[in-house]
Image (cartoon, rainbow, N blue to C red):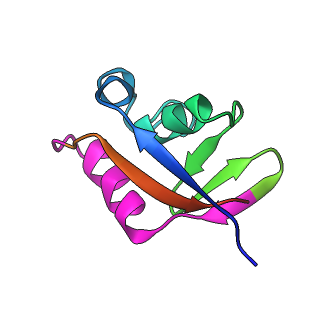
């Protein structure tokens, strides 16, 4: 049985996030705000502690757009917990 977390990526996370940085992209920043202080976002998955979980397609597209320099907007993602 999977558990989920709704993670809000804010305009501040986007403005202060760093493209192609697994620990400082907007989604990693949002995960830290949600209590996952050691979150890492890599390709199609994210890590908390030693455990990994797959990202949904919309989160992957968001990261790809952000890394490519495209405009992204604040949003909420439902992520499986690792």
The quarter of the displayed image where residue 20 is located: top left
Tell me the residue at 73%/60% (across/down): 82
Observer-nearest residue: 4 or 47? Answer: 4
Q: What x and y, as percent, mark residue 23? A: 57, 33
Let me know if residue 61 is in the magenta part: yes
Left or right side of 22 for 70 = left
Q: Is residue 18 above or below residue 76?
A: above
Left or right side of 51 for 8 = left
Q: How many marks?
A: 0
Let me know if residue 48 is in the magenta part: no
Residue at the farthest right position: 50
Tell me the residue at 29%/44% (across/down): 66
Observer-nearest residue: 60 or 82? Answer: 82
Tell me the residue at 36%/21% (across/down): 16
Q: Give the position of the N terminus as an image quadrant.
A: bottom right
Observer-nearest residue: 72 or 81? Answer: 81
Observer-nearest residue: 14 or 4? Answer: 4
Tell me the residue at 22%/43% (across/down): 72
Q: What x and y, as percent, mark residue 30? A: 50, 35
Q: What x and y, as percent, mark residue 75? A: 32, 46
* Residue range (magenta): 52-71
Q: Is residue 51 above or below residue 9?
A: below
Residue at the farthest bottom position: 1
Q: What x and y, as percent, mark residue 68? A: 24, 46
């Amino acid at each position: 049985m999977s558990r989920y977390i709704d993670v809000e990526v804010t305009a501040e996370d986007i403005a202060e996030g760093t493209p192609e940085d697994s620990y400082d992209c907007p989604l990693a920043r949002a995960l830290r705000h949600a209590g996952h202080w050691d979150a890492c976002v890599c390709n199609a998955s994210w890590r908390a502690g030693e455990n990994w979980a797959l990202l949904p397609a919309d989160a992957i597209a968001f990261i790809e757009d952000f890394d490519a320099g495209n405009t992204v907007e604040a949003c909420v993602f439902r992520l499986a917990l690792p």
